[in-house]
Every structure is written in structure tokens, then in C-alpha cells.
Image (cartoon, rainbow, N blue to C red):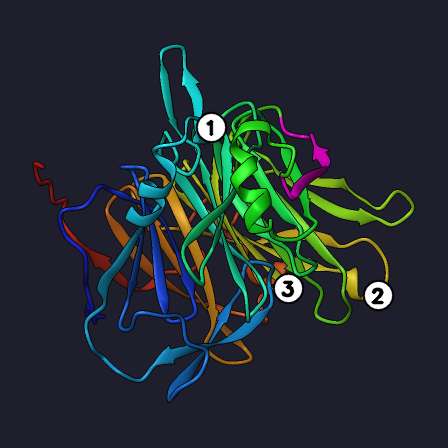
């Protein structure tokens, strides 16, 4: 596999990436969000080809990809210079972040750890989560920060938006929180928001507690038939907790725990039938999900253990190549990106050497790039 495109140089380390329309948004260690694109605005039209990928809650979607192979360029940084100029004069726009330090409410004061896209196709919203324990809400049409609220008591590690519009956040405080929204703040409300926080439009629905240590990753898996979905959470306690909706109380409750990893579980990726988990123990486990379509509780079994990385696995992504095969991409602190070809028809019986800990699948490709450091 060859590198098709590279862009951006001289900026702080990239901590998160998300695609919004024609734009690529990147979160950096310097507490800024950068917007990359080939044009100055998000477009949902034009001549573009489609590509089938797995979304954050386990369903496949058709992503539109620009037909133009031109270079991506930096369009803007968030918060924008315009917002800085508007906000820096009024004292009400400053919040206390430390004993003798105040910062503008529109900017994060620690590493931005995760980005997620919500809202609607006509009015997309960007959520940014940070180690400063806050979540900020951005309107992508004009890159304006609409809202900021403290979400956790410790660093936020994961963020996702469910199909029904709810926001899920996971933190090092071992909690998962579910947030609802009553709509975007109006301009007049937004001007009053930094001081009192009374106009915050996101509210806490539930706090989910089942982990004994930091929660590092979240993934939603929607059933093949039906509207139900399961939530998976991965933690430093080596466990993956399966959450399903209890309709009597209208809340996610833990239905089981997937065990097997010997160290912290750092990342998750799922489709309708499979869940993949990456761990600090340098292995990837493939879990098959079944039983949910018949109306009962879903069951899970580990059908494969993928070995090949020499360091903790930090990121996973799945994509269907056809109906019977799925491609898994994994990246690790060993500075490698590996591509795995998984057969959807895998069963427990086909895995004979799991107990001996040997590799079940071999990567079909491996991308290796040396570390590059630059002084600023």
C-alpha cells in the first residue's frame, strides 16, 4: 500500500480526526482544532464517488469522497481569530481554570482527546472533548463555539453520538455519561452563557458505572434488523462491558462483561455482527455478536485473536470489502499500521489455536513509518 496523500506540517501532535462533509477536522496537542479541505465550505453535493465504511455504531454507510485528487489545505483553526477578537474584551467571557489563571470559555485548556460529529445533515455540529474535563459544541457552518460544559471529574477519553442524537462520553473517572440536547443556543443566550451556564442546552440524562478503572473507548453496535443497539465500553480494568437498553427504565444497563485481554483495553471498532478490541497486551480480539435479532439478549464469543503488533494497539477501524469479508485496520505504538482481512463467516469452531495464544489471522499488509521529530 502506498501513501496517497499527506498534508499538514509543523503543528502539534494530532490526537483525533473526524470527517465532516468535505472537511477533515483534526484535534491537536496544542489545544486547537484545525480544519482541512479543498474548498472553503462544507458541501454535500457535487461529483463524488462513494465508499462503504463502518460507522461509529456498527452500521455501514456510503461516504462521499471528492473526485478531485488535489491537496488538502488548512482552511481555519478553532477557535477562530474572529471569535477570539469578539470574546477577549468582555470579562464575562473568561473562566477560572486554575488558582491564578483565567482563559476564554471558547478554548480548551488541555489536550483535545476526541472529536465527534452530530446534529443534522443541514446543520452539522462538532463535539470536542478534552483532558480539561469539558466538552465544547461547535457549529460547523461558521466554526462558532456555541456551548461549553464540564462533563466529568477527570480527563475525557472517548466521545460518540448515537443514532437517536444522544451524546456519550467516557472518562478516566471510570464513568460513562449520556447527554441530551434541547437544541442549539440562540445568539442572545450564547452571549450570556459563559458567566452563568444557565443557558446550557446539553443536560445529563444518565451516568453509567460498571468499570473499576478508566474508560478508554466506546462503540455502538446497531442490530442488523431493528432499531436496537448495544453500547460497548473498554477500560483499563481489562474488561469490555456490554450495555443494552432497559426499556422499562429507559436507560442503558450492563448486560455482561467480555474478558480475555491481559492489559488495558484501549480501542474498539464494531459492525452489526462483530466487535474488535485492541489492547495494551498487543493483541486484537475479534468477538462475534449473535442472538439479538431473535429478540433475546445478545451473546458474544471470541472467534479470533490477532497478533502481529509489537506495542499497545491504540486505534481500530473496520470496512466491508464485500458481503463476506471485512477489512480491519489497526495502528499501534510500534509505529505500524496493519491491514487484516477478516472473513464474516468465521465461527468458534474455525479457531482451534486460541488457547495456545498463537495468531489466528495474518495481516495482509503492513505500513511502517519512522518517527519524525521537529522543534518549534
Q: Is residue 349 visible?
A: yes
Q: Foreground mark, 2 or 1?
A: 1
As measured in the structure, the alpha-carbon distance from the residue carrying label 3 to the one carrying label 1 is 50 Å
Residue range corresponding to the magenta coloring? 200-211
Q: Is residue 310 magenta?
A: no
- Can you identify the residue that label 2 sits on? 294
Crowd class of label 3 (few under 14; some 14 to 19; many from 20; radius 10 Å): some
Q: Residue furthest top?
A: 99
Q: Secondary structure at mark 3?
A: loop
Q: Nearer the viewer, residue 356 or 265?
A: 265
Q: Secondary structure at mark 1?
A: helix
Q: Nearer the viewer, residue 104 or 66?
A: 104
Above or below residue 18? Residue 43 is below
Q: Residue at x 70, y 59 (%)?
A: 164
- Marker disc for residue 126: none
- Can you identify the residue that label 1 sits on? 92
In this rendering, would 219 be left or right of 249?
left
Q: Secondary structure at mark 2?
A: helix
List x then y, in percent, for residue 67. 31, 84
Label whose residue precedes the other's in the sequence (2 or 1) = 1
Q: Residue at x 68, y 62 (%)?
A: 222
Amino acid at each position: 500500500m502506498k501513501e496517497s496523500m499527506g498534508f499538514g506540517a509543523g503543528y502539534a501532535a494530532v490526537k483525533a480526526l473526524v470527517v465532516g462533509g468535505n472537511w477533515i477536522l483534526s484535534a491537536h496537542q496544542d489545544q486547537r482544532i484545525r480544519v482541512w479541505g479543498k474548498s472553503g465550505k462544507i458541501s454535500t453535493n457535487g461529483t463524488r464517488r462513494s465508499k462503504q465504511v463502518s460507522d461509529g455504531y456498527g452500521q455501514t454507510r456510503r461516504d462521499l469522497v471528492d473526485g478531485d485528487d488535489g491537496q488538502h489545505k488548512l482552511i481555519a483553526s478553532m477557535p477562530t481569530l474572529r471569535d477570539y477578537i469578539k470574546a477577549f474584551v468582555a470579562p464575562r467571557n473568561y473562566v477560572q481554570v486554575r488558582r491564578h489563571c483565567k482563559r476564554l470559555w471558547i478554548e480548551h485548556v488541555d489536550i483535545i482527546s476526541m472529536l465527534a460529529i452530530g446534529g443534522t445533515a443541514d446543520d452539522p455540529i462538532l463535539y470536542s472533548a478534552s483532558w480539561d474535563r469539558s466538552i465544547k459544541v461547535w457549529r460547523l457552518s461558521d466554526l462558532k463555539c456555541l456551548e461549553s460544559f464540564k462533563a466529568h471529574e477527570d480527563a475525557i477519553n472517548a466521545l460518540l453520538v448515537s443514532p437517536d442524537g444522544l451524546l456519550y462520553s467516557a472518562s478516566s473517572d471510570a464513568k460513562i455519561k449520556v447527554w441530551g440536547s434541547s437544541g442549539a443556543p440562540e445568539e442572545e443566550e450564547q452571549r450570556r452563557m459563559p458567566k452563568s451556564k444557565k443557558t446550557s442546552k446539553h443536560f445529563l440524562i444518565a451516568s453509567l458505572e460498571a468499570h473499576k478503572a478508566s474508560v478508554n473507548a466506546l462503540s455502538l453496535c446497531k442490530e442488523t434488523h431493528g432499531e436496537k443497539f448495544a453500547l460497548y465500553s473498554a477500560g483499563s480494568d481489562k474488561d469490555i462491558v456490554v450495555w443494552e437498553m432497559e426499556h422499562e427504565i429507559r436507560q442503558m444497563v450492563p448486560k455482561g462483561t467480555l474478558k480475555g485481554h491481559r492489559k488495558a483495553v484501549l480501542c474498539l471498532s464494531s459492525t452489526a455482527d462483530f466487535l474488535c478490541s485492541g489492547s495494551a497486551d498487543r493483541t486484537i480480539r475479534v468477538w462475534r455478536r449473535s442472538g439479538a435479532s431473535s429478540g433475546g439478549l445478545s451473546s458474544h464469543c471470541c472467534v479470533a485473536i490477532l497478533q502481529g503488533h509489537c506495542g499497545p494497539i491504540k486505534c481500530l477501524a473496520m470496512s466491508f470489502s464485500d458481503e463476506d469479508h471485512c477489512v480491519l485496520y489497526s495502528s499501534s505504538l510500534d509505529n505500524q499500521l496493519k491491514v487484516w482481512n477478516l472473513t464474516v463467516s468465521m465461527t468458534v469452531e474455525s479457531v482451534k489455536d486460541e488457547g495456545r495464544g498463537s495468531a489466528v489471522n495474518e495481516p495482509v499488509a503492513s505500513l511502517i513509518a519512522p518517527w519524525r521529530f521537529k522543534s518549534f
